[in-house]
Amino acid sequence: MSNPVIACRNVWKLYGPDPVNFLRELDGQDPGFEALREQGYISAVRDVSLDIHHGEMLVIMGLSGSGKSTLVRCLSRLVDISGGEIDVDGADLSALSETELIDLRRNKMGMVFQSFGLLPHRTVLDNVAFPLEMRGQDKHARRARAMEMIELVGLQGREEYFPRELSGGQQQRVGIARSLAIEPDIWFLDEPFSALDPLIRREMQDEFLRLQDLLGKTIVFITHDFDEALRLADRIAIMKDGAIEQCDRPGNIVMNPATEYVAKFTEDIDKARVVHARDLMMPVSSGVPEGAAISAAATVHDLARRLVDDLNPQIPVADENGAVVGVLSRDAALNVLLGTA
């Protein structure tokens, strides 16, 4: 696997009287959230180690106060960490000068937050072009780029509207278009759809998946909605009290929750719609089984008819190029489908 775009090593963010020296005294130990609080410290981020790879959508989720938003602000250095190291494309984020940090944010990072943050006195076009204006780009070039982004998010014809003339979902699209205008390599989204009603939220998730399929960004997406996480994520990191309880593919989290806390998130999930063939497949040990190969990306729900009709105990599994990469046990898949796994 290629080098990570973002690498976190033992990252801490403590609030208290002297967090840096206090962490030195801990000497790599994590006494736990409650023990830290008894000593006068709030651990917003607690000993997080994590790699995020090119083109990956990592969803960070947890309940309010779990540390997910603080972690993302650490990844963009909107807040400085108390300990550990964050590398972005191999550069130590904490070692960057103010000028280097501004350049990184302007040219490599896009951010979308829960509040749309649109400028009410500016049109859609001028809102989307605003970061390019701050970059010093000439008027014609920035307006042309802004129009491209407006069309990309499906708002063509509304470029001269003001924010007050748009629905909540349309305003969120403007925020997304604005963040994409700078062509970021890394895209941070902090609960961007949580203020939307359920129908518009679903539509925005569809739109977001379409954009990711087109653009292939490296994305860190925050949500407290497990269904949203399952729908969007390549991997999910579940946080509690500042620490990551488990980080894995959605299917693996649902099938093999690492802690009781993670298990509570997964207990009401329809596993058949989340678990993919790749999550259950085993290596080919004694020749490829008979029959047409199934896609590793297919969910057990997608395979229901095949599982009922095909009596072979094993089914070949193929990658996106059609090469067989493993075998699926029919019994294991049926157990997931029937809710007995």
Image (cartoon, rainbow, N blue to C red):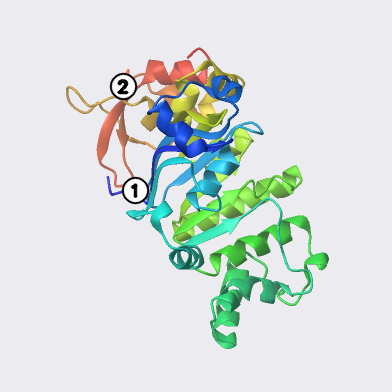
Please tell me which residue lies in front, 78 or 263.
78
Please tell me which residue lies in front, 71 or 259.
71
Which residue is found at the position 79% from the left and 64% from the top? Answer: 166
**Residue 98 in sight here:** yes
- At label 1, which amino acid type do we have? Pro
- In the image, residue 118 lies at what x, y percent? 72, 64
Dot 1 or dot 2, earlier in sequence:
1
Q: Which residue is outermost to the top?
A: 340
Foreground: disc 1 or disc 2 = 1
- In the image, residue 9 lies at what x, y percent? 37, 39
Q: Is residue 263 above or below residue 235?
A: above
- At label 2, which amino acid type do we have? Gln
Disc 1 marks which residue? 4
- In the image, residue 154 lies at what x, y percent? 64, 65
Give the structural element (helix, strand or loop) at label 1.
loop
Which residue is found at the position 51% from the left and 55% from the top? Answer: 187
Is residue 195 rendered to the left or right of residue 257? right
Disc 2 marks which residue? 314
Give the structural element (helix, strand or loop) at label 2.
strand
On-image quarter of the N terminus: top left
How far apart are the alpha carbons under marks 1 and 2?
35 Å
